Image (cartoon, helix red, strand yellow):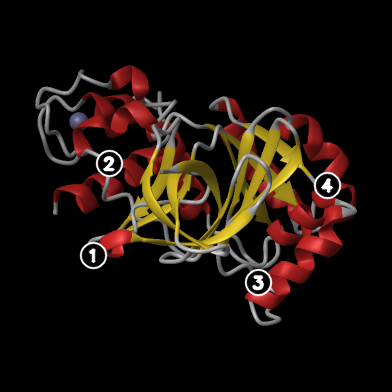
């Protein structure tokens, strides 16, 4: 006899699941399966009053993951809105931002950029830099940690959201601000689980209200995109999408090939050279 539940905490191999009536259980998988993610709706079988086994996941609305040459890391399932959190201090990586946006496009998840710690003077340069991403259609929202909750609430409303970013960008502070009075309780849990560390080491799902969920995820250093197909990459660039299918070769690497529509557009100044370089770099990774 199986029941359904949602994975609310993922440690990579161990999980905590919550049933519709609000009970939580420690969960393991069969045959060392690790293809489950925080946010997944799953079928479970009881082992005892505290432990269950996850049998399988139910159909997913979305799956966000990253993959390098060696392994795949599932980030979250059923997310409908990705919030890339960055702050001018400590120095954020624009490459990581671009990669997270590509992954979101590939997973058909709506992406929003959150420029946190916006009161810092160093923010000005990033505010300027992010105007380009705004021109691509991504919303850019500025937050100052303590006021972050009020600014973000309407953006998150009705979605299953995830905060993604490098460590030190203030994801957990924003999460705590959004949780408000719930924070003390959940803080206790995560402190116990993380043995007192101040950084998030696992993905954790919180309910903000009946129809809004938020997943806080561990800080990212890298964002491998090996799961994407080189031939589809152009579709994931809002500024280059119109050039898809226009190169002479379907497997064009947009470097030395004749009649490359992307290079032609760059030479005419119609698209940004930096974006073409980024496209070339990711293409190289995928065809290696
Ligand atoms: Zn090309």
Q: Assess disc 4: are there few (<14), some (14-19) or many (≥20) residues with their C-alpha within 10 Å of its C-alpha.
A: many
Q: Looking at the image, is mark 3 or mark 2 earlier in the sequence?
A: 3
Q: Position of residue 265 (x, y in %)?
A: 32, 24
**What is the x, y in percent for residue 126?**
67, 49
For marks 1 and 2 on the same chain, the one whose residue lies earlier in the sequence:
1
Residue pictured at 62% horizontal, 65% vertical? 91
Could you tell me which secondary element the residue under label 1 belongs to? loop
Reading the image, the residue beneath label 3 is 199
Residue 260, located in which quarter of the rendered image?
top left
Relative to 98, is 8 on the left or the right? right
Q: State which tag comes first along the sequence, 2 or 4.
A: 4
The residue singled out by tag 4 in the image is: 148
Classify 10 Å Cα crowding around label 3: few (below 14), some (14-19), many (20 and above).
some
The foreground one among 118 and 277 is 118
Mark 1–mark 2 Cα distance, whole angstroms, equals 15 Å
Circles 3 and 2 in contact, beta carbons < 8 Å: no
Which residue carries the number 2 mark?
228
**Ligand 1 lies under 8 Å from the Cβ of mark 2:** no
Instruction: Mark yes or no: residue 187 visible.
Output: yes
Q: Nearer the viewer, residue 49 or 164?
A: 49
């Amino acid at each position: 006899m199986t029941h359904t539940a949602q994975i609310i905490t993922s440690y990579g191999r161990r999980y905590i699941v919550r049933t519709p009536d609000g009970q939580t259980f420690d969960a393991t998988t069969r045959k060392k399966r690790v293809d489950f993610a925080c946010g997944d709706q799953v079928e479970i079988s009881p082992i005892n009053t505290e432990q269950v086994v996850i049998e399988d996941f139910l159909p997913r609305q979305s799956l966000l993951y990253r993959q390098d040459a060696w392994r795949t890391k599932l980030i979250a399932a059923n997310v409908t809105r990705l919030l890339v959190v960055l702050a001018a201090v400590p120095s954020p990586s624009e490459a990581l931002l671009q990669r997270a946006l590509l992954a979101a496009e590939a997973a058909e998840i709506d992406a929003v950029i959150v420029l946190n710690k916006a009161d810092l003077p160093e923010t000005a340069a990033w505010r300027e830099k992010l105007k380009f991403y705004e021109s691509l259609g991504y919303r850019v929202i500025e937050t100052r940690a303590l006021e972050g909750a009020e600014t973000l609430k309407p953006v998150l409303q009705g979605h299953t959201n995830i905060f993604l970013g490098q460590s030190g960008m203030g994801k957990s502070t924003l999460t705590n601000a959004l949780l408000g009075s719930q924070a003390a309780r959940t803080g206790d849990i995560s402190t116990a689980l993380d043995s007192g560390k101040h950084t998030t080491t696992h993905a954790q799902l919180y309910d903000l209200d009946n129809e809004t969920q938020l997943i806080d995820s561990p800080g990212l250093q890298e964002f491998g995109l090996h799961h994407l197909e080189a031939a589809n990459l152009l579709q994931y660039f809002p500024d280059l999408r119109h050039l898809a299918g226009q190169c002479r070769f379907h497997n064009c690497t947009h470097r030395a090939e004749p009649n490359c529509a992307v290079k032609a557009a760059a030479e005419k100044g119609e698209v940004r050279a930096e974006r073409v370089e980024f496209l070339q770099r990711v293409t190289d990774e995928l065809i290696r």
